[in-house]
Amino acid sequence: MPPSNILLIEDDKAWQGVLQTLICEALSNINQEYHIILAQNHTQALEYLKSDTAWGLICANNLSFASEIQETGSVAITHGIPIIFVTQSESCAPNEFSKNSFDLGKFKQFIEKHLSPKLTTVFLCYCHRDVRFMERFEVHIKPQTYRSNIDVWVDTKIRGGQDWRSEIEKALKRAKIAVLLISADFLASDFITKYELPTLLDKAKTDGTVILSVYLSHCYHDPFKLSRFQFINPLDQPLSGLNKHRKEHYWTDLTRRIRELASETDIILNG
């Protein structure tokens, strides 16, 4: 995902250091890069906001900054950007914090809530016998995960000592997109056909999870009614029978479709 900036407005040098440290601590569990930009006063801060910069959060030292944004016409620039106030005043508002009785836990929760990236999880469902196809898909999709909201989950992410079933369950629950690499081996897998596939088909019906199927080799898949979801490649063109050029064409089509769906999801989540 692209890096974002946090605008910190604070003229007290002691509090500058304190807030920078606290913000960094709050960001330690967030899988996204942020840069803290320091402004000494409101005038300087408003100039920064006019720049072509991706802002993730504004941390101001005076409640009047909100009205100044309105007065200068910067409200359009700051639309959707959370503003947090750290002042000398006492307040119980969710985004206001007092320097006199600073609530560290509440401060960290606010930052984590508003800055945690909203990811579109892509669940890759495949049979291990088809691992070479899985690996080729990963090559195509990987560049999209660098600067986007796409998170591809595949069982190779499970680490030693983790409860593998629990990890799969959590990934299935998060899945907004499911990629099915369909073959005879895929359909012969009890774990896929009795657990993963029914779960994903149910999520497609109840949660709107999008099913994207790639036909790897000829097989009888009608009992699962998978053909009601448009395949990436035609059923008379399974990947196993295509040359490298045609295979790459369909992997590209799949990647493009995932990117389109993730962009739509990002608009819904952040709009």
Image: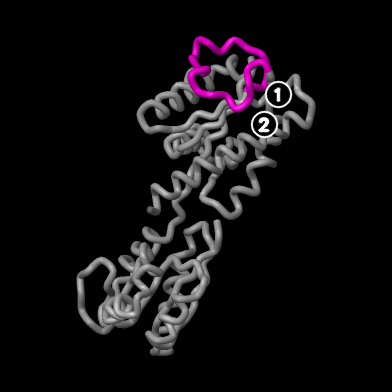
Mark 2 belongs to which amino acid? Tyr
Task: Give me the disc on residue 174.
Answer: none
Q: Can I make out residue 108 in this image?
A: no
Q: Can I make out residue 6 in this image?
A: yes
Q: Main secondary structure of the magenta part?
A: loop
| Residue linked to disc 2 | 250
Image point (41%, 80%), residue name: 46
Residue 217 sits inside the magenta stretch: yes
The stretch of residues the image draws in magenta is 215-236
Image point (55%, 56%), residue name: 1
Task: State the image quarter where residue 72 is shown.
Answer: bottom left
Q: Is residue 220 left or right of residue 249?
A: left
In primary-sequence order, the first of circles 2 and 1 is 1
Q: Is residue 264 left or right of residue 181?
A: left
Residue 96 sits inside the magenta stretch: no
Contact between marks 2 and 1 (CB within 8 A): the answer is: yes
- Distance (Cα) linking label 2 and label 1: 8 Å
Task: Classify mark 2: helix, strand or loop.
Answer: helix
Q: Position of residue 231 (x, y in %)?
A: 57, 24
Q: Name the one closer to the observer, 83 or 100.
A: 83
